[in-house]
Image (cartoon, rainbow, N blue to C red):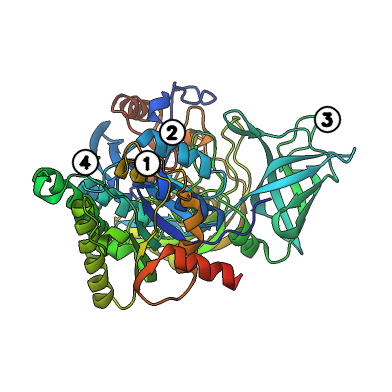
Amino acid sequence: MTGVALVKPSVAPLDDPIDFQLPEELVAHEPPEARGLARDGVRLMVSRVSNDSFTHTRFSHFPDFLKRGDVLVVNASRTINAAFEAVREARDGSTSEVIFHLSTRLSGRGESWVIELRRRSATGTSPLLDARPDEILRLPGGGTARLVAPYAPGGSVIANSPVRLWIAELWLPESALKYAEHFGSPIRYSYVPNSWPIEYYQTVFADEPGSAEMPSAGRAFTTEMLQHLGRKGVRIAPLVLHTGVSSLETDEEPYPERYHVSYPTALAVNSARRLGGRVIAVGTTVVRALETVLGEDGYVRAGRGWTDLVISQERGIRSVDGMLTGLHGPKASHLSMLEALAGRKHLAHAYRTLLEKKYLWHEFGDLHLILP
Amino acid sequence: MKKQLQQRTALITGASRGLGLALARGLARHGWNLILTARDEQRLRSVCDELATITHVAAVGGDVTAPAHRRTLAILAGGHAGLDAVINNAGALGPSPQPELLEYPLEVLSTVFETNVIAPLGVLQAVRDELKPGARVINVTSDAAANAYPGWGGYGSSKAALEQMSAILAAENPTLKVYWVDPGDMRTDMHQAAFPGEDISDRPLPDVRVPAFINLLDGDLPSGRYVAAALGQVAVEAA
């Protein structure tokens, strides 16, 4: 199997994420469409781990780098309008405006969600850390949220420490997904100054709604390209992993997220590998889901549930051979995942090259294809 | 608190000043998503910043007479998953004061036609695949298109051409609603240029005409020529 050979032991320190200065000019502040580029007009750097080489092109040439028998695994989660303007009612009765983000829907009855509170600041928004249990937030259109408890998966909360994510109980005039459609807007961070309609945050694969943030590696695909890939004999296999809010301000580990890998997708992945095709993940979310359902025998299973998997170079990646991904900020936990696939040396070289060649970062930016 | 958003998108040309700016503000308040363009990037940027607090605004500076700029607008329209309305508002008056036809510099006349006739069609050709069924097309015209005012030969004849083009577009595209609308005299930079040195403070601000355009966009009137002042009247009576 081609994929297993990729995991090489590393001599680099494992607890030292790749760090660099991201110049302001390399941040994509708006969708490529606003720069007059079609979705597939963004730049693509293809990097090959085996000989540490790079090719610079446009995403419209992406199919040239795939061959018959390869399978592209994509995230079919649909982005929801997860940001709302809310009014916070303090204990003394005073009110203030805050930004309310839906992150992840929790299992169980009613609308129970992991949520994030932010406040407006001079440069956009920043996390709001001084909320308390039982606080009430008034949402648009007659919705209400009550903070139940700090959200701390796999750990306890230190008393009086700042809390960014909460478990909240919601009372809404309609289902949360419908409500988001009607009253919310897409989550954005300060580096995207203007709000863009939700269409800009959907990929061509978007099917099941539930992501707080766009699975952005799939953004550049178009229906025409899918037809082209189909004619070439490249299979497209969807899975679903609903993304939660990212943690851009901090070095936090990723939170648990809901996933669903169908039987046909597991079959497509396994048969590609058996027949010598490559499994290419479109996005870090796909790697997270596939590694979650990977068995000891190197084959993936169908499955659904929550994954809290964090992929480091130490752990390695066995389910995929290559990956298409956006460009990640310094110290992002995603970089550890990329390191696990590409090795520290190649990834550091790749990021130096991306910086030198002035590629654009973040969800509206350029793309990086990592091949064996 | 923000009200429920309608997911309708309008493209407005010449949106940094005058009627275009008034329409952008009016539509934003009615929950429309906007794609705005104008040549004056700085003014457009401030319009964008102003309206971004109310709705989704994508503003891109450029000249609608440039094919590359029209392609950019089409790409944005595609990004918005299609257009519910196109308002061809950008226009050129020509020299100020306007010369009589026998003195009219032909190279200037050709730029007036380029902006007032060719560019609106060029915009529609560029975004044709992004027009949703039943989309509204509004071409802004003038009473100078229908009346032989001395000194209005360049601008007036270009608007007459735009009107006939609109009528034929309507006949050729029954799935669209094509309106060519005379907004009437307004207190705008263009109107001031048409009457240099004169006091035009008796003319209404363009905001007054906005309800007429909203009525056309929200209503189901047949394709045709409309006078904004009359439509505004209807709105007041209906209300």
Find numbered disc 3 in the image and state the secondary structure of the residue it sits on.
loop
Q: Which residue is mark 1?
A: B189
Distance between mark 3 and mark 1 Cα atoms: 59 Å
* Amino acid identity at mark 3: Asn
Q: Which residue is mark 4?
A: B95
On residue A160, the disc is 3
Which secondary structure, mark 2? helix
| Mark 1, other Cα within 10 Å: few <14 / some 14–19 / many ≥20 | few
Q: Nearer the viewer, mark 4 or mark 2?
A: 4
Of discs 3 and 4, which sits in the foreground? 4
Chain containing mark 4: B
C-alpha distance separating marks 2 and 3 = 36 Å
Nearest to viewer (mark 3 / mark 1): 1
Q: Badges 3 and 1: C-beta atoms under 8 Å apart?
A: no
| N-terminal-most mark, 2 or 3 | 3
Circle 4: is it few (<14), some (14-19), or many (20+) Cα within 10 Å? some
Q: Residue at x 26, y 63 (%)?
A: B147
Can you say which quadrant of the picture contains the C terminus of chain A? top left
Q: Secondary structure at mark 1?
A: helix
Q: Give, as a three-letter code, the residue at label 1.
A: Asp
At label 4, the amino acid type is Pro
CA gap, disc 3 and disc 4: 70 Å
